[in-house]
Amino acid sequence: MNGKTVMACMDAAYAALKEHTDEIAVLDQQIGDGDHIFNLLRGMEALLAVRADIEKETLEAALELAANKVLSTVGGSSGPLFFSLLNGMAKASANNPLDVAGTALMFAAGVEAVGQRGKTGVGSKTMMDVLIPVAARFKELATIESPALQKTVLDELPQVAEQNMLATRDMLATKGRASFLGERSRGHIDPGARSSQIMITAVCAQLARNRA
Ligand code: ADP
Ligand code: MG
């Protein structure tokens, strides 16, 4: 994995988000202020604009560059959170061999950094409700010894992401803008959970294509 892998994953995530623009805009209109998808797309477009700089880097430097670009272009709550994910992954990538277990630890470190930044875990109806269970299952799967482990991981993580994204519908929001709605936040999927799930699914599909 290197800068080219990062860019290929970003391309896949961007295309998938773009396809779901209207849906995610509506989710954030229902329990937020409607800007979530546009914040994300702006950040991803800034990344795509520095493609050549990212592609020539090592994994660590590419993730760090992407993190900084995101921080300076994505607004809202999700900008600093997305920065923390990429930056946390960049830092951990230096210490881990990038086999399945190392990649799982790298992702978990990114998610932990988001948790520290946003000061929340599972159950507050945010992107963490997708990120934490995916990171946990990733680490668990990485302990299995199987020649088909990569395929298992890439098939299963999108399912974990989807189940947990759907589960945010019935939750009460206790963090971020949606928490201002109190009980009225129930009955709507969290936009950050949906965008995270879409990106995880797209990145897994991209990595599966890379393997093939
Ligand atoms: P804003 O709420 O400032 O308009 P965005 O619309 O870009 O920011 O992002 C909203 C998303 O950010 C929510 O759907 C939720 O998933 C996520 N979020 C909000 N607060 C937190 C937090 N403290 N920790 C993790 N995620 C959060
Ligand atoms: Mg918003």
Image (cartoon, rainbow, N blue to C red):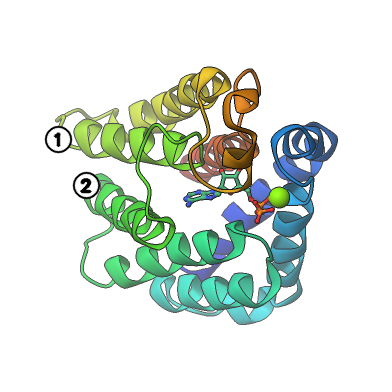
Q: Residue at x 54, y 66 (%)?
A: 80
**Dot 2 surroundings within 10 Å: few (below 14), some, or many (20 or more)?**
some
Sequence-earlier tag: 2 or 1? 2
What residue does disc 1 label? Answer: 143
Q: Residue at x 14, y 35 (%)?
A: 143
**In this view of the protein, which residue sits in the foreground, 133 or 191?**
191
In the image, taking residue 167 as reference, residue 35 lies left or right, namely right
Q: x and y percent of residue 91 in the render?
A: 32, 72
**In this view of the protein, which residue sits in the foreground, 132 or 64?**
132
Q: Quadrant of residue 117?
A: bottom left
Q: Amino acid at mark 1?
A: Thr
Asked if disc 2 and disc 1 are in contact, CB closer than 8 Å, the reply is: yes
Element type at marker 1?
Answer: loop
Spatial CA distance of label 2 from label 1 is 7 Å
In the image, taking residue 155 as reference, residue 25 lies left or right, namely right
Vertical relation: 6 (above or below) 50: above
**Dot 1 surroundings within 10 Å: few (below 14), some, or many (20 or more)?**
few
Q: Residue at x 36, y 65 (%)?
A: 88
In the image, taking residue 18 as reference, residue 126 lies left or right, namely left
Q: x and y percent of residue 195 in the render?
A: 63, 40
What residue does disc 2 label? Answer: 101
Q: Label 2 CB, ligand 1: below 8 Å? A: no
Q: Quadrant of residue 146?
A: top left
